[in-house]
Amino acid sequence: MSKTSWFTIGRVTGVHGLGGNLKVWSFSESIDTFCPGKTVLLKFENENAEGAPYTILKAQPHQKGILLALDGINTRELAQDLMGCDIFIDRNQLEEPEEDTWYWQDLYGLDVIDHIKGFIGKVTQIFPTGANDVLVVENEGKEVLVPMHKNFVASVDLENNILKTTLPEDY
C-alpha cells in the first residue's frame, strides 16, 4: 500500500482579530504539527485545484482549537476568504509515528480480518471518543465499530493492507 503523501490536519473555522489570524479545528493530537516554518496547503473540500501553499508563522492553543498565523495572510478579509478550507501537510514534514501508533489516513481502506469471523470489511471512518479511537468498518452496507485498543486490534500491516482484530464472539 502506498502511503498518502498529504494529510488533512485541520479546518479553518473562523478568524480572530484584524491581523489575519485563523481559528483552526485541529485533527492532530499535538500543536507541534503546526510548527512555524512548515508549509501547508489550504483548499476547499470540493475544490479540484491543488490548493494554495502557505508557510506557518505562528500557532498557539485557543479555546478548543488553534490560532494560526500564515505568511501572506495579514488582514481579516484575507483570512475570511479561507474560512472552511481544509489544511493539508506533506507527510515528509511529520515525524514517523511511534510503534503501535498510526496516522488515521494510513488506516482508511484497510481490510479488517477477525481471527474467528474472517473478513469483516474495510475501514471507512475513524472517530475519537476520548478513551480511544473507534474504527468504522463497512461491508455490504453493514457497519461494525471496532475500538482501536490492544484488546480488539491484534495487528496492523500497512504493507499488506490488513488490520487483524480479536472481537468477542457475540460482537
Image: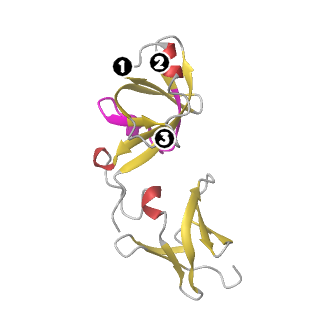
Q: Mark 1 points at which residue?
A: 72
Q: The residue under label 1 is which amino acid type?
A: Gly
| Percent of width and height locating residue 144 | 65, 71
Distance between mark 3 and mark 1 Cα atoms:
21 Å
Q: The residue under label 3 is which amino acid type?
A: Glu
In this rendering, position of residue 36 left or right of residue 18: left
Q: Residue furthest bottom?
A: 116
Q: How many marks?
A: 3
Q: Who comes first in sequence, dot 3 or dot 1?
A: 3
Q: Which residue lies furthest to the top in this view?
A: 18
Give the quadrant of residue 102: bottom left
Res 133 visible: no
Q: Name the residue under label 3.
A: 47
Label 3 crowding class (10 Å Cα cut-off): few <14, some 14-19, many 20+?
A: few
Q: Who comes first in sequence, dot 3 or dot 2?
A: 3
Give the quadrant of residue 122: bottom right
Q: Mark 2 points at which residue?
A: 78
Label 2 crowding class (10 Å Cα cut-off): few <14, some 14-19, many 20+?
A: some
Whether the residues at callouts 3 and 2 have beta carbons within 8 Å, the answer is no
Residue 169 magenta-drawn? no
- Provide the secondary structure element on which disc 3 rests: loop
| Percent of width and height locating residue 68 | 45, 26
Whether the residues at callouts 2 and 1 have beta carbons within 8 Å, the answer is yes
Which one is closest to the eye, mark 3 or mark 2?
A: 3
Residue nearest the observer in this picture, 165 or 105: 105
Q: Residue furthest front?
A: 48
In this rendering, position of residue 75 left or right of residue 159: right
